[in-house]
Image (spheres, grey):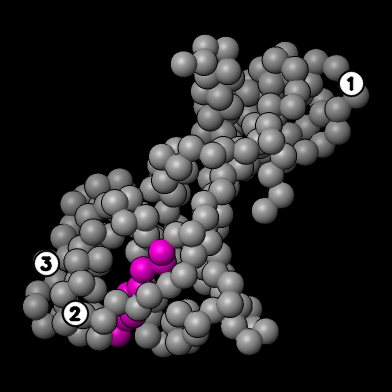
Amino acid sequence: MYVPEHFSVKDAAVLYDWIERWSFGTLITSHRGRMEANQIPFLVDRERGDLLGHVAKANKQWQTLINAEHLIVLFNGPHGYVSPAWYSQPEGVPTWNYLTVQVQGKAELVKTESESIDILRRLTNTSEAQYGPGWRIEDLGEARLKAMTQSIVCFRIHISTVEGKAKLSQNRSKMDRVGVIRELGSSQDSQLQELSRLMMDDLKQKKNPT
């Protein structure tokens, strides 16, 4: 991933926070010259340095997962177009602001039903806490849960590298950044509003470093 130094984020704790916040990632693998990409919800196991996930057994990507020559998972945060008209000076050009995390590693298939259920439970509990009303995997019932685990394949990705990029107009003047923050924040698009808040947080951190 191309990451200019002023956009680079190296703090692993921050990057794991971002993965947890935008956990619907894109799993990309190459095997014998064939590329595959699928969108998958992930969970970070910080203690072991792993990503946990699952795919439908009908999804053939799992069959080449452990032997993939290259494996990358992309996590994308909010993104938005930036017009040069928002800058204090007229010499700017159009661009795009965004946050992204790129993980590389090796995969291992989960072989036991008990560990698969544990992964599903952790994924569900995390998602329900963030988005849902509190539904539990136990609400399925034993027979339905067993049938579901037989129709999926769970896996771990042992993380070898994790890179982060936050392109938030850090290469522009403070006045330019404030202009972009104002325009994005005034949008009705919640994604652009969130991008505006992230830019403001970054600007405050640079002003008051710890």
Q: Is residue 173 visible?
A: yes
Quarter of the figure with residue 143 = bottom left
Q: Nearer the viewer, mark 2 or mark 1?
A: 2
Q: Bounds of the magenta span?
A: 151-158
Secondary structure of the residue carrying tag 1 is loop
The label on residue 90 is 1
Q: Is residue 161 above or below residue 144?
A: above
Secondary structure of the residue carrying tag 2 is helix
Residue visible at 52% across and 55% down?
161
- Horizontal and vertical percent for residue 75? 52, 54
Q: Is residue 99 visible?
A: no
Task: Please state which amino acid type lies under the numbered disc 1.
Answer: Pro
Taking 169 as reference, is 29 left or right?
left
Q: Earlier in the sequence, mark 2 or mark 3?
A: 2
Q: Earlier in the sequence, mark 1 or mark 3?
A: 1
Q: Nearer the viewer, residue 26 or 209?
A: 209
Instruction: Quote the CA–CA distance across marks 1 and 3.
Output: 59 Å
Residue 1: within the magenta? Answer: no
